[in-house]
Structures are given as C-alpha cells and as structure tokens.
Amino acid sequence: MCKEIISTNGKYCLDTIYFGGGTPTTLSLSQFEKIFLSLREKFTFSENIEISIESTPEMVTIQSLEGWEKLGVNRLSVGIQSLNPKTLKEIQRSEKGDILQCFETLEKYFQKSKKIYFSLDFIIGLPFMKKGELLENIKFLLENYIFVKHISVYMLEEYYEVPEEIDSKFENIIYPNSWKANSIPEEDYLEEYVSIKAYLKEKGFFQYEISNFAKPGFECKHNCGYWSHKENLAFGLGAHGFVENTRFSNSENFIDYYAKRNIFKENLSEENIFFEKVMFSIRTKGISKCDLKQLNQEKVNYFLKIGYLEEKGEKIILAEKAVLLLDYILSEIL
C-alpha cells in the first residue's frame, strides 16, 4: 500500500483520510506509522484535516487511542450494531461485555483528551431484536455516557437465500434468510427509525443524511465530501476511488492488487454524474428545484401529491414516511 501511495500521480492536499472497510485497527501502530509516513511524503495535509479510523469494540484500549491520537487520528468510528447478546452472537460481532468495556474506555479517554471524537454505528432489523429495543440501547448509551458525538443508524433490508452448506463460510458477509425470520417485520422498521430519529433530535443530534446524526460541528467530513462528489483517492485491497470523473476500485485479490489490476473502472458521463448528484442530494439536503427539469416531472408531482416528497424552500426533500422507498422513488423520477 505504501508503494501504491508513493506512486500516485498528481499533487493533492488532503482534507480527509479514512481508514475503513474491514477492520483496519488490526494493523499495528508501527504499520500505521509507515502508512502515515508515505502519506505525508506524497501529499500535503490541510490545516483542519479529518482523519478517521474504523474499529471494533474489543480493539479499543487506552493504549491504542493514545497511539492513534499521536498519528493524527481525530475521529474514531466503532461498530456496535446492538447490545443484545443473542443478536451479537448470531451476527458474529463483539460480545456485550466487550462493548460495555469499550464505552467505559471511550468515556475515560474523552475525559482526558478531546482530540478524538467518537461515532457509533447501529443497525435496525438485526435478528432477535425486539421492537423498540434498539431505541432503548441508544437511550442507555446517551443517558450514561457523554463521549458520543455522532451516531449512524442503518437499516438491514436485504436478505438472501443461502444454502446451508455455504452458510457457515459466508455468514459474515451474506445475510442468511434466517435473520429475517428472527427480526422485527419490515413494516416496523420505519416506526423504529422515526422513534430513534426523534430521540436523537431531543438529545441535540441533528440529521445531516438519512442514516447519520451528529452534534453540531461533528458531521463526518469524509462522508460529506463523498456525497458532494468530491474526488477521493483510494489505496489498498478493494478500495474505491473517484478521480477526474472516473470511478475505480482495486481488486480484493492480493495477487491482482499487487499486479496493479483494477477490477472496475468507469468514466462517468454527464448523465451518470447527474444521476449520482440526485441520488446523493436526496439523501442529504434535498434536490435543487433547478434540477427538476431533468427529472420525470410527472412522477415528481405524483410523489409530492401523495406525500413521499416534500417542498422545503428551493429544495425537494424525501418525506420521513418514504425513507424505506428511496430506491423505488429514485428509479421512478430518474
């Protein structure tokens, strides 16, 4: 990866760096140091650069936090998903005890240093979670700890029929159909989402994207850049980038990656760029009315009439009740 970084063409000033996908915190601090040396050798860092890293709860210790902070990391995202022990076991994630210990560690570190801010991820629709349970998980968190500045709440919508003989091999990347059988009905997802959204608003978190909520000033700059079509370089196996209107991704196969073979490369047309602009806009601040003439006006008016879309100033926004229908609405208006 360091060689890949150094061989990058062009000069860039980095606004954000994001270590994510998989579990980057399995890297040792010395390995991270080598990566940062390569980044600093090749690029300049903006004055207010955001450097994020993803982690699992059991990898979070006072020592690791101190090491990451010294490297310049100022945002840590931890995948929690749920506090239900049965759920965590089923989805092969951290045990509840590890998660609670992580909370204590983050709280202790937050009292000591304010240089890293913390984000936690949760998922609606996981197996064995009862209706309203995820809201109670989040209430427990926010009523007992003050370190949380950002929360992401995703919905698990896709399930697949997985043959039993391969289920055990791929259950960490494919959602077995059995999950759906043991989850709350999809018709309850919206109610769950709305109740969590209302509670987070009450606690001072504002929504800046369908799945993302932050205390003022703690939005994820990296994600905001992605949603606003900013260029992003990508390094490492399976990494996805966007440079000069071209999307690309590295191979997830080490031999192909080492041979510098991209598994995907697409030069975006003006039509593609507009499609992505609308797709990202509706998830965040809304679609500009200036762009409506390029959309299916009949469908837009229909969704406005039935309340799936709403007018807000010079924007068309997605109505709260239509969150689960986003993909369908996009397919109709584009």
Image (cartoon, grey):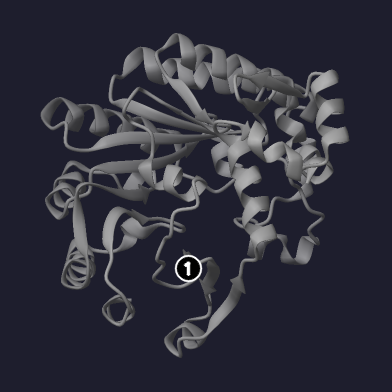
Of the pair 88 and 188, the residue shown nearer to us: 188
The local crowd at label 1, few if under 14, some if 14 to 19, many if 20 or more residues have their Cα within 10 Å, is few
Going by the image, does 264 lie left or right of 77? right
**In which quadrant of the rendered view does residue 89 lie?**
top right
Q: Is residue 156 visible?
A: no
Left or right of residue 124, residue 225 in this image:
left
Q: In the rendered view, would you say 124 is above or below 262?
A: above
Return the residue found at the far top.
202
Quarter the N terminus occupies: bottom left
Q: What residue did someone put label 1 on?
A: 244
| Residue 57 image offset from top left, x and y in percent | 37, 42
Q: Count all numbered tags in the image, as a single digit.
A: 1
Foreground: 248 or 68?
248
- Say which residue appears at 47% left-offset and 21% top-offset: 138
Visible in this render: residue 333?
Answer: yes
Q: Amino acid at mark 1?
A: Glu
* Left or right: 105, with 226 as reference point: left
Q: Position of residue 294 (x, y in %)?
A: 74, 45
